[in-house]
Image (spheres, grey):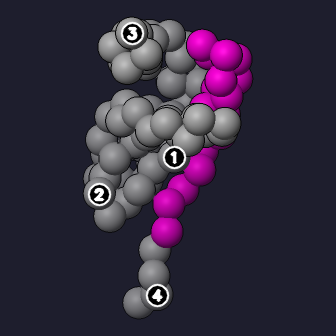
Amino acid sequence: MGKVGTFPFGWVRGVRGENWQIIWDPKTEAIIAQGAVSKQIIQLGESSKWMDAKVYADKVMSNPEAFFGEKLESKTG
């Protein structure tokens, strides 16, 4: 079996002055947001299955503050 990489699901734009790419890593099962400029990484959740990770990522993209607004506050304070 070949090497499995990460799956980028989309972007959250303009949160705290940054654009965040939502990424799932099947090896670690982590769903993360990575800042486009700062390269800061924030773990948002976990999933062992692609479809569950996709659903989670879609929820994050439709309402980003509900998922990582608090995590951003704690990292930038």
Q: Are marks 1 and 3 in contact (CB under 8 Å)?
A: no
Query: Which residue is at the front of the view, 25 or 39?
Result: 39
- Residues in magenta? 5-20
Question: Residue 45 at x, y = what percent?
Answer: 32, 34
The disc labelled 4 sits on which kind of residue? Answer: Gly
Between disc 2 and disc 4, the foreground one is 2
Q: What SS does tag 1 mark?
A: strand
- Residue matched to label 3: 77
Between disc 3 and disc 4, the foreground one is 3
Question: Residue 26 at x, y = what percent?
Answer: 37, 60
Dividing the picture into quadrants, the one containing residue 3 is bottom left
Residue at position x 41%, y 33% in the image: 42
Question: Residue 56 at x, y = what percent?
Answer: 44, 32
- Residue matched to label 2: 28
* Of the image marks 1 and 3, the number of the one nearer the N terminus: 1
Dividing the picture into quadrants, the one containing residue 31 is top left
Residue at position x 67%, y 16% in the image: 17
Q: Are marks 2 and 3 in contact (CB under 8 Å)?
A: no
State left or right for residue 28 relative to residue 12. left
The disc labelled 1 sits on which kind of residue? Answer: Ile
Query: Which residue is at the front of the view, 20 or 55?
Result: 20
